[in-house]
Image: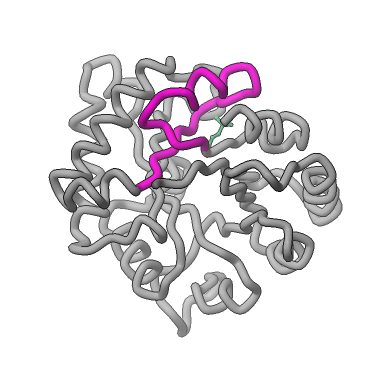
Amino acid sequence: MRKKIVAGNWKMNVDLNESTDLIKSIKKIYDHNIDVEVCIAPSFPFLKESTELCQGEKIKVLAQNVNDNLKGAFTGEVSIHMLKSINVDGVILGHSERREYYNEDDDLLLRKLKVSLKNNFKVYFCIGESLEDREKNNHFEKVKNQLDKTVFKIDNIDPENLVIAYEPIWAIGTGLTASPEQAQEIHKYIRNLLSERYGKKISDNTSIIYGGSVKPNSARDIFEKQDVDGGLIGGASLSPQDFIDIVRSI
Ligand code: PGA
């Protein structure tokens, strides 16, 4: 069976003290018996402290980016081995903010994806359409295209190591959420694409999570949908209570 996952993407929002406080508060109110993979993605400088604080807590710590090379003269970059050496569990790739502001195109993302999976580093891979795509009814074509150029170029995927995050760009940080029906419709479409590419077993076992303005009051209706296996949470993950309320909505 596929996993239920709620991941908090803290983006570039918190400093060391705030990041430590957030983790401590989450630990206080998090009920470990819930069968959900809970992840947080702090910024690079705080990852070591975060993995130490989360040790034995059933909270996974993710990076928000990684380089597509394993080592070498790449000033300012961070490698998979560096992240693994401080017990980081995986990485968010393909986020629309990285695609848009840092020009991460499908070719680069494919390289990052390949090197991560090859080195057994779990990837939370984001796809999603713009408002313009949605208004022109191009959203299905857009996500298919993104998958064709990245994930689907890889012949074997392991659902233990790859999570798909559907994040419509028009819903990220805007307060606009896809309706539960819109989310279900496209998650089902993505699952069918996975099935065509890798077979039903892999498709059934791959978690597809939703991201885009998920809040405690909207989470339950979205998570209830059959093909929605959890969420990637931005703004609301900066409030420990909201984040844990979202986790509890699964
Ligand atoms: P949001 O961000 O919840 O603030 O919309 C989601 C994301 O960017 O992953």
Confirm whether the magenta stretch covers residue 154.
no
Quadrant of residue 48 in the image?
Answer: bottom right
Left or right relative to 26: residue 231 = left
Is 82 above or below relative to 9? below
- Percent coordinates x, y for residue 105 in the rendering: 31, 52
Left or right relative to 188: residue 196 = left
- The magenta stretch is 206-231
Quadrant of residue 185 in the image?
Answer: top left
Q: Nearer the viewer, residue 217 or 20?
A: 217
Residue drawn at x 69%, y 34% is: 243
Residue that lies at the very extreme toward the left in this rendered image? 196
Quarter of the render that holds ligand 1: top right
Residue drawn at x 70%, y 29% is: 245
Number of labels in the image equals: 0
- Percent coordinates x, y for residue 155 in the rendering: 18, 63
Residue drawn at x 62%, y 57% is: 60
Is 70 above or below relative to 63? below
- Percent coordinates x, y for residue 107 in the rendering: 26, 58
